[in-house]
Amino acid sequence: MNTVSALAGVVIKELYRRKDFYVLFFLTAVITLVMGSVSFFHDAKIVRYVKEIALLLIWVSALVIAIGTTARQIPAERESRTIFPLLAKPVTRWQVILGKFAGCWLACGLALIVFYLFFGVVSGSREHHWPLLNFCQALWLQWVMLGVVVAFVLLGSVVFAAPSSNATISFIVVLGILVLGRYLNQVALQQPEPLCAVIYGLYFLIPHLEWFDVRDLIIYDQHLVGWVDCGLATLYAVLYMAVFLVGAWLVFRRKPLNL
Amino acid sequence: MKRFAPYLVLLLLLAACFSLATVLQERSASWSKRGASDNVLNVLLGDGRRLFANHFFVQADISFHSGYYPSIFDQASRPKDTSHMTAKEGEPAEEEHEKQMNFLGPPRDWIERFGRHFIITEHTHLEGHKESEILPWLKLAAELDPQKIETYTVAAYWLRDLGKIKEAERFLREGLLNNPDSYDILFDLGRLYYESNHDAARARKIWDLALRRWSEQEAANKKPDLLKLDDIAVNLSHLEQTEGNLARAVQLLELAKKASPHPDVLQQQIAELKQKLATRAPAAAPKAP
């Protein structure tokens, strides 16, 4: 466990040493504040468009941080040959996978806390009320979703040759699931057999990341998601994380480390 | 001196650039067909901005429904027009819209059933002054596509409803500037003067102009909206009735009758007005020379 947390600590240090997070946070803050300062028809109470833009930017930034940080972890270790002294410590390959995953996931969590603090301040200053439980639930669900994304990208980083191809493919897959995942069953039912069965199978196979996107509930001041549903969704995500991590370990344990 | 030579050359070049820019700046305006009034969005997006404008208009509708809105996969349930955005509860347009928006249906599998706990599943419309939340999207849509008439009329409707008469007038005027031939915008502007400002003289001028624009478009075979002709003529007729010009009111109702989906109702009104005119005529007769 100490080995895993030590590896995770290195990844978290990398997040605050690199410029990615600062640039993304700065861009999110500037765009949100500029849009928030625009006066539409002299009505100071209009706030939902600011929340919509801010949350969209937070989602995009969090995905960029999660995929960008995770995709380069193992390839960078192999490229700089630091993977050899690391494995000679001795650290098992499973611990490397688990440590990298924990580091990337925790780093995403830290970044999300900063983003949501900013969002809470901006939204609260305009609306004059802070639905803290809703914010916490949205943050939690997004973080759990990012766990699945991080595990998936980690699997990609031991399968694909370069971090760039891994990041691109991961982005396409994640965005595809977020945008289309919910409707695959509708699409399947309109297709003839056997295409219908194939698409429906895909629908049951993919992790439904779109469940974790509760931005609309925050933007339109809707009810909280039930805590039982929240727990079940978390369990669902944990299972997918485990699937991807075990998959990554299975590929990584037999992979030659020389480039 | 040699040490400073490159810096002096650099300064000289900068001075040359600056001088040339002052000369060329004025001339460059005539090189491009693009007018000086074009804003940054037009320059950046070109005609593609209309696509974004439509997206923002739909976003206003989504906001109006608090996020409950059919996706592209529920095309059949997507609102076909904008009438529901300016319809009050109980109106026919609203009832029809209520049926249209019942697009979710029973869940097809456990994934869909569970997924519904994380989305908005209730059809509601904004109320209690929250309607203003749709205005930023409409403003953006108008910026991107100034030729989309509905953007101005829907925004003006809600601005009036929220008591922002001046802003509504300004926005409609902006729309009119971009679409000088739009009888829709003229009709709404007339309503604003008549219903909100109680300025009958100005409303009459604007509605007369709207009628003229409608006729011009019909003459040019542009197939203008018949229902809008009905709206303009009926509203102008009511104005003339309250101002005492019954003969003109009858003429206008006759015009509206050609376009109305309920001509029998208008015919009844015409008959009543003609009766009033007939009773008024003998009283006026002795005064005639």
Image (cartoon, coloured by chain):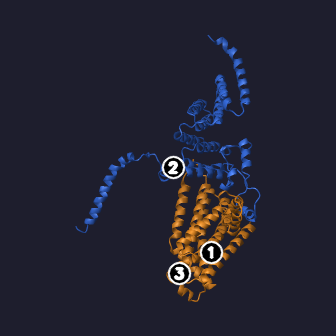
Chain colours: A orange, B blue
Residue B242 seen by the camera? no
Q: Is residue B114 left or right of residue B12?
A: right
User: Which quadrant of the figure has residue B165?
Assistant: top right
Q: Residue at x 55, y 68 (%)?
A: A168
* Residue for badge 3: A77
Disc 2 packing (10 Å; few <14; some 14–19; many ≥20): few
Image height check: is A178 above or below B28?
A: below
**The residue under label 2 is which amino acid type?**
Asp
Chain assignment, label 1: A
Amino acid found under the numbered disc labelled 1? Ala
Mark 1 or mark 3: name the one nearer the start of the chain: 3
* Residue B28 coordinates in the image, percent (x, y): 37, 48
**What element does badge 3 sit on?**
helix
Where residue A133 appears, x then y in whole percent? 69, 65
Query: Residue B6 appears at what percent x and percent y?
Result: 27, 65
The residue at which mark 2 appears reads as B47
Marks 1/3: CA–CA distance: 17 Å
Find disc 1 in the rendering and name its residue.
Answer: A151
Asked which quadrant contains residue A241, the reply is bottom right
Residue B104 spot, x, y in % from top left = 73, 56
**On the rendered image, what quadrant is the N terminus of chain A found in?**
bottom right
One can see residue A78 in this view: yes
Please determine if labels 1 and 3 lie on a single subunit.
Answer: yes
